[in-house]
Image: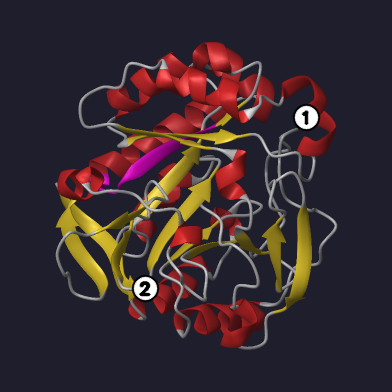
Amino acid sequence: MKRVFAAAYRGGHCLVHDPATGLTHTSPSPVPVGRVELDEGTVSSWPTVHPGETGARAPISVCWSPLVRCNLSCPHCLDDKTLAEQSSADRLRIARLLAGSQVMGVDISGGEPLLLRDLSSLCEVLTGAGLVVSLTTNGWHLERSARELRGRVDAVAVSLDGPTAHVHDSWRGKGSFERALAGVRTCTRLGLRVQLQTVLMADTTNHAQQVVDLAADLGAGGVTFLQMLPIGDGAALAPSQMLDDTDAQRVVDGLATPKGAQVRLRRRDAAGGFSVIRADGRLWRNAPSAEGIGALRVLREVEDLTLDGRDGSA
């Protein structure tokens, strides 16, 4: 199956960034720069490279959380809900700034990004400049929004913390499981690439195989397991729920992966240094251990994105 990736030359390598998995691959042969349609299976067979090893001066990809508003209240949320949201004009300015940068991919998160009235126009600015765009959502509003997203985002990541309503809703609230699944089904029917995302915690490890199987049943492209980060609300939950990278890797390595599904663990050690643009319009970066995050500067110009340490992985 063919879909859109971002391609660029950094540090002597031809890099191809996957908006669905967040992985960056090295192409064995030249490909056109910018948004390029490639075979998904072919790209997934290419070697991956950690963004910190590419020699790039700007982040390969960033997470942009332009709002803190959310219809759910999850105990493992990474966002800082005390931040003031910028105006729509400021959001447009940041979209244009990213469009003029060397960033290859932007994941729009939150808060819940489907609450943004100007989401479509922001996506169009980014994709029009050659970037790939993914959207991370809790899925509550996804069924009604999917048609508008088609052609404006290249992948949708849907947060799912369990394979049943009983498990998932215990983390994210009553009704959230069925709403998320309805959104995934609509996206796959419309041809939107979907990747499920599960926060890997002590209480969710026993359900990991069932989540992978559910992804296959729904027609999603795979599952990204995110090592829990003790950031935001998650800091209070971490002592009882946070696995170390070795135990998390053991869980994922033990999974039976359906043919064609892309299952990935985003470890904490890989997330160190990852760039996040929060609702206050400031650039934040994960600590090297990814067990904390710090604000660096207000984004005023492209040069403000310049890396001052090792890049991190989405």
Q: Residues within 10 Å of mark 1 (few under 14, many from 20)?
A: some
Figure check: 278 above or below 263: below
Q: Residue at x 35, y 27 (%)?
A: 215
The x and y percentages for residue 137 are: 53, 46
Q: Is residue 196 magenta?
A: yes
The x and y percentages for residue 98 are: 51, 78
Q: Nearer the viewer, mark 1 or mark 2?
A: 2
Q: Is residue 311 visible?
A: yes
Query: Mark 1 is on which residue type?
Result: Ala
The x and y percentages for residue 211 are: 43, 21
Q: Residue at x 76, y 71 (%)?
A: 296
The x and y percentages for residue 214 are: 37, 21
Left or right side of 303 for 96:
left
Q: Nearer the viewer, residue 310 or 190?
A: 310
Q: Residue at x 72, y 35 (%)?
A: 76
Disc 1 target residue: 238
Query: Mark 2 is on which residue type?
Result: Arg
Numbered marks: total? 2
Span shown in magenta: 190-198
Q: Residue at x 58, y 25 (%)?
A: 246
Q: Secondary structure at mark 1?
A: helix
Q: Is residue 79 magenta?
A: no
Q: Secondary structure at mark 2?
A: strand
Disc 2 target residue: 10
Mark toward the start of the polypeptide (1 vs 2): 2
Label 1 to label 2: alpha-carbon separation: 36 Å
Figure check: 269 above or below 166: below
Residue 187 occupies quadrant: top left
